[in-house]
Amino acid sequence: MSGGRATIAVPLAAVAMLMGGCRSPVPFHGRPGPDAPVLALGGPEPYIRPPHRPAPVVDQRRDLPDAPHDVYAATQAGMLSPAARRLPLRVYVPDSRGIGVDVIDAKTYHVIRRIPAGRAPQQVVPSWDLQTLWVTEPGGLVPINPRTGTEGRTVPVAAPFDLYFSVDGRDALVMSARLGRIEIRDPHTMRLRSAVQVPCPGLTHADFSASGSTLVVGCAGSGWLARVDVARHRVTGTLRLAAGARPQDVRLSPDGTTFYVADMGRGGVWMIDAVRFRTVGFIPTGRGAHGLYPSRDAGLLYVTNSGERTVSLISFAQRRAVGSWRVPTAPDMGSVSADGRLLWLSARGDDAVFVVSTRTGRPVRRIPVGAGPHGLCVYPQPGRFSLGHTGIYR
C-alpha cells in the first residue's frame, strides 16, 4: 500500500543524510512489495521477525484499490519465516492404513525416520506459529517437533479429519466429519472452547477468505458447501453444487475473489464467488479431482485427478485448464517444494510418494513408503503463518 511505503521512506532518507548516504551491507532478499519484510540498516537477518499476531490480510475485492494484489505475496520461493528458516527440509507422509508418519529427507529422497502417530493418520498440519506439526488420527491430534522429529503426547479429540487456524492465530478449527461440526480449540493446548454445527454431512477441507473472516468448507457427503463466520462461530450460508458432487479441497484465488473447489464426483473444479457465495463456473479436469495446490509464483493451480492419473494445470489469470501431466499412478494429495521446482504427490494405491518436476511435468523420483500414504506435508514452506491443512500459508 502506498501509505506504508511513504512512512518507511522518510526515516530512511533521514538516516541516509546523517550517515552520508551509507548503504546497508546486508542484502535484501525477497520480492519487493507492500507485504514484503523490511530489512533494517545493518540488521543481521534478511527478514525482521514478525509480531506474534500479524495483522489480518486485507480483503482482496477489486473495489479496494489499495489492497495488495496477491494473498500469496508472502509465500514466494525463498521467503521463509525466521521461525522456519533453519528447519531441515523434510517431507512428512502419514500412512492412512498404518500407525505412523514416514519422514523423507527432501534432498536425498530417502526415508530417514518413522514417527509413531496413533492409528490410521490422515493429515500432517503445520501450526499457525510454524513451531509444531499436528497429525490428525482417529484418536486425536499428535504433535511432532519438526526440529527433532519426535512426537509428543496425543491430545484426545473425537475423530479429527483436518485442522485449520484462524488468520490471527487465536483459534484452531478441527474438522470433525463424524460429529458434523467444526470444533473451536486453543491453538496450543487444543482444549475445546466451543463448536459450530454444520448442516451438511461429510466435512472435508476448507480455506479462508482474504480477510480471514469467512471459512468455506466442503461437505463431500451431500455435495454442498458451507460458509462459516469465523469470529461469530456460526454458519452464514450453504450452497449446493450439483447432483453427484463430492467437494474435496478448497483454495482461494490469489486476488481473493474466487474459491476453487475440487469435485471428485463431477471430475473438475468449481469456481465460487467469494463475496456472493455462488457458483460462477466449472473447469473439467478429470475423474477424481481431489487436491489443489498453487504454484510458488501463484500463477497456476495444480489439481490431482486420481481417476485419470493426471495433474491438471489451471491458470488463475485465464480461469481455465492450460495443461495436464500424466503420472505413473493415481495421485492423491500433494505439496509444492519451498523453491517451487517440485510437486510432491502421495499415491495411496501404490504405497509410494512421487516427485514431479514443475518445469517438465515428468516424475523424477518414486519413494516407497508405508501403507496408504495420504495428506503429506513438505516442511518448511514460505509464508508468515500457516492456516492449516497440509500447508495453506499467507
Image (spheres, rainbow, N blue to C red):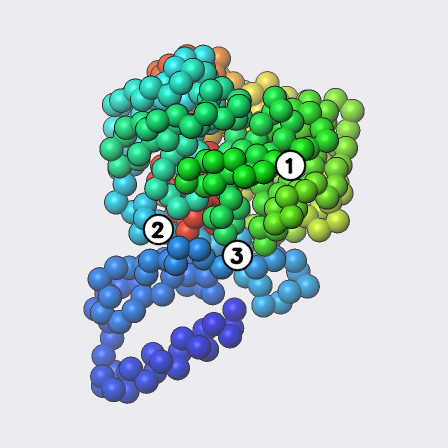
Estimate how packed mark 1 is, as few (under 14), some (14 to 19) or many (20 or more) residues with alpha carbons within 10 Å: some
Which residue occupies the foreground of this view, 193 or 357? 193
Which residue occupies the foreground of this view, 135 or 383? 135
Secondary structure found at label 3: loop
Name which residue lies at 71% across and 28% down: 200
**Mark positioned earlier in the residue sequence (3 or 1):** 3
Estimate how packed mark 3 is, as few (under 14), some (14 to 19) or many (20 or more) residues with alpha carbons within 10 Å: some
Question: Residue 63, can we see it?
Answer: yes
> Which quadrant holds residue 287?
top right
The answer for how far apart the CA atoms under marks 2 and 1 are is 32 Å
Q: Identify residue for label 3.
A: 56
Q: Identify residue for label 2.
A: 81
**Mark positioned earlier in the residue sequence (2 or 3):** 3
Q: Are marks 2 and 1 in contact (CB under 8 Å)?
A: no
Q: Amino acid at mark 1?
A: Val
> Which quadrant holds residue 131?
top left
Residue 252, horizontal then vertical, whole percent: 59, 45
